[in-house]
Image (tube, rainbow, N blue to C red):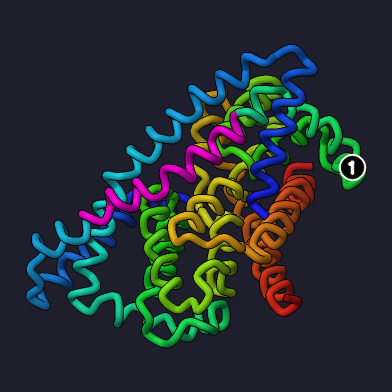
Amino acid sequence: MIGILKILSIAIIPAMMSIILLHGYINKVNLYDAFVEGAKEGFQSALRIMPYLIAIFIAIGIFKRSGALNILVNIISPIAKLVGVPKEVIPLAIMRPISGSGALGVVNEIITEYGPDSFVGRVASTMMGSSETIFYTMAVYFGVVGIKDSRHTLPAALLSHVASIIASVFICNIVFG
Amino acid sequence: MINYVWFFMIAIGIIVAIITGNIDSINMAIVEDASEAVMFAIGLTGIMAVWLGLMNIAEKSGLIRSFSKLLTPVTKLLFPDIPKGHPAMSAIVMNMVANMFGAGNSATAIGLKAMEEMNTLNNNKRRATNAMCMFLVINMSSIQLIPLTVIKIRADAGSLAPTEIIGTTLIATTISTVVGILSAKILEKKE
């Protein structure tokens, strides 16, 4: 099962590309012209998301580098511990929605310090794989279409994130505990 | 919302930096992270152009239309506001497929296209539609099947079974996605 999924992970993009090209060829689309025409938009899209990326990157950078993130971790830790989340993975739980590369750094630290096959190492790995960055994604996706009012997106995404943390701890307890 | 989050992250960061005598970290953030953001966007340009090119072919050949019609029964529940056979639907599904298989940058490129398509159905261009919120919530709950980066880190650290967390990750991510979908469905009605 895992082997099949791994192969699929490598083959999926070439497969999607082949299907699109073959379908276009059969339906007599001028492939080259259509591709170039669409690709032109790529630069506009990249330019359009750039200011949003810069805004979010510096906000996260300032928050992280100033030490404010560490303070936030210290404040939230006691609450998270009450729910049964091991204190070693709490920095990860807080970093994950804010910064993807930051979270990866935390996972690396946890795994180096406690070992990949330790309980916290496994919980951290599960947590990393089962959640995503939130603030950056929202900024870019809404930014590109100029949406100002994101409505319930953030609360729903944060609820989903909390669920992924609790689920990770719970499942690792059952499987590896 | 993002307005407040953005302001408070910066304001709190600056205050903390002043208190801890670490003001230079603010300069570092402004210089380094701003250029990192530009590099990131530039890095995304190539893959974005590739997918927008391919999507344009798929649109002209009619593949997008047939694909969205095919998936209508599945996506009708999640995105009831998107009409049958609308190009937004196929972009959404292609984004999800790319995400499931860990093709992050391709997924972003297609996902942005999906947002633009959904915005054509939007009456108030400043306000997110239910479909957009649902799409992003699913997107941000992670639907990746194999967490390749994590497996790589574990293998590099000498794990005896680097892939043993695939099962637990799949279960955890399914739970978080379901919670996200339910939260979005409940919260959208409360507004």
Q: Residue at x 74, y 42 (%)?
A: A176
For mark 1, what is the residue? Answer: A79
Above/below status of A96 relative to B13: below
Residue A150, quarter of the rendered image: bottom right
Q: Is residue A168 visible?
A: yes
Disc 1 is placed on an element classified as helix
Depth check: give the residue in front, B87 or B101.
B87
**Residue A50, above or below A8:** above
Residue A147 is situated, as x and y percent measured from the top left of the image, at 52, 62
Indicate the position of residue B35 as horizontal and vertical percent values: 43, 28
Residue found at x 7% / y 68%:
A30
Q: Is residue A53 magenta?
A: yes
Asked whether residue B160 appears in the rendered view, the answer is no
**Front residue (pair B191, B93):** B191
- Residue at 33% over, 38% down: B42
Mainly helix, strand or loop, the magenta region? helix
Q: How many marks can you see?
A: 1
Whole-percent x, y for residue B154 in the image? 56, 31
B123 sits left or right of B91 in the view? right
Residue appearing at x 36%, y 52% in the figure: B106
Question: Residue under mark 1: which chain is it in?
Answer: A
Q: Which one is nearer the viewer's eye here, B3 or A102?
A: B3
Q: Let me know if residue B130 is in the magenta part.
A: no
Region in magenta: A40-61
